[in-house]
Amino acid sequence: MTKQPVIGLLGGGQLGRMLQEQAALIGVELVVLDTADCPTKQINQNDKHVTGSFSDAEKVRELARRCDVLTVEIEHVNTEVLEEIATKGVEVDGQMKKVQCHPSWETLRLIQDKYLQKEHFKKAGISIAPQVAVGAGEDMMRSMKEAADKFGYPFMVKARKGSYDGRGNFKVDGPKDLEEAVREMGKLSLYAEKFQPFRKELAVMVLRTEDDGGNLKDVHPYPAVETIHEDSICTKVFYPPRGVSAEVSEKARKMACDVIRTVKGRGVYAVEMFVLQDDSLVVNEVAPRPHNSGHYTIEAVPAMSQYRAQLSAILDIVPPQIKLQPRVSGAIMLNILGGGREDSHNSLVDLTRTVYDDEMDIFLHLYGKASKPGRKIGHITLTSYSPDTNLERLAAPLIKEVDRIRE
Ligand code: ATP
Ligand code: MG
Ligand code: MG
């Protein structure tokens, strides 16, 4: 086998850890920039790792010197330095070496600003929630009132940059909340968005392949899944989506492909969507990387999980006859969020060993992270193999315990 290029990864959390699990299986070397004890490095001994932050330009340059290609497990990275490395290069032994990042720094920069991201999709004819930019300083209250006049109540005020797990979102229920919104969010660059009274949330992972010239080869969607968010954080994922027709799921896949045709760079992307009461679809946002809604593919699409797909796209080794259809009839993913005590989740871990049914497999993933309230510290995937199995009923004790430890 010819030597595979070495991949440098910005960020070493759980997504990197699951990427590493797959990288090990196919002999791909992953070099990580993050803290020394991060979840990814815990399972990947390599003396090329860089200790530091993915926001630190010099550390990113150091990572690039040690690798052939870069990728990210988080979009909130320093794109100025990624641009510099891709276009001018990084100095190695007096020579400039160019290292590309997948997805491209341009896509990361666009996606980092959720307002600009969605303006871009709107221009491409993709349906998004109506949105307006919110002014800063003295203009803030005035432009929030304008948003209220335009959208009515409730509406959402959102941070344009840096948000995840709903941190950076504020729901304005009425005029009484405006002052609090300014107080809580006023230091951030903001936009306002019309509230979407959705009946479901869906997500579609899309694999985008490109040739060496950066030309689109193809987009391959995984099936649509239903995502459940509680307190704005994803807690559960259901495949297939419950209460959504095959037509709507297909429409979601098509829309996700349309979205991902408009960005640049190889890799997997998540397209989050709202299903409105009339079954129309609105794109909420895109994540340019493996995603919580795709964890279930590790077991459900064992030959091409989202992590294997990410590596294959980056290295341009995606099989021509790629199959992304799950091998299971159903899957449920439950996030393990840290509870009130450091060991709150132990009862759930114990349950994964005692709950048993012939028709269901249970897969526990712990990320090697210290528990903190609300922090994603692991997940459980449940799978079934016959359309006659009621997986949700079999999973009920685990679902109940996941909900209990969040209380
Ligand atoms: P992520 O962790 O997915 O990156 P985020 O911090 O970027 O999350 P969003 O995806 O914008 O946040 O919103 C989180 C959740 O809040 C959504 O999945 C949805 O449940 C709810 N939400 C966001 N925007 C709206 C809206 N306009 N109308 C109704 N609900 C919304
Ligand atoms: Mg987001
Ligand atoms: Mg989101």
Image: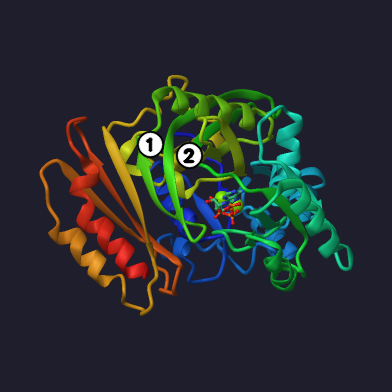
Q: Which mark is residue 157?
A: none
Question: In x, y percent, where is residue 309?
Answer: 47, 36
- Residue under the image location 31 percent in, 74 percent down: 344
Along the horizontal axis of the image, is 266 left or right of 371? right
Q: Secondary structure at mark 1?
A: loop
Question: In x, y percent, where is residue 227?
Answer: 44, 46
Question: In x, y percent, where is residue 22?
Answer: 40, 46
Along the horizontal axis of the image, is 230 left or right of 146? left
The quadrant the N terminus occupies is top left
Q: Amino acid at mark 1?
A: Pro
In front here: 215 or 128?
Answer: 128
Q: Is residue 37 above or below residue 238?
A: below
Which comes sooner in the sequence, label 1 or label 2? 2
Q: Are marks 1 and 2 in contact (CB under 8 Å)?
A: yes
Q: Is residue 136 above or below residue 102?
A: below
- Residue under the image location 52 percent in, 71 percent down: 36
Whether residue 105 is visible to the viewer of this picture, yes or no, is no
* Residue labelled with disc 1: 241
Mark 2 Cα-neighbour bin, 10 Å: few <14, some 14–19, many ≥20:
many
In the image as oriented, which residue stretches furthest toward the right? 138
* Residue labelled with disc 2: 202
Question: Which of the 4 image quarters holds residue 168?
Answer: bottom right
- Residue under the image location 80 percent in, 51 percent down: 133
In front here: 48 or 144?
Answer: 144
Question: Which of the 4 image quarters holds residue 226?
Answer: top left
Along the horizontal axis of the image, is 244 left or right of 195? left
Q: How many marks?
A: 2
In the image as oriented, which residue stretches furthest toward the top? 321
Q: Amino acid at mark 2?
A: Leu
Mark 1 Cα-neighbour bin, 10 Å: few <14, some 14–19, many ≥20:
many
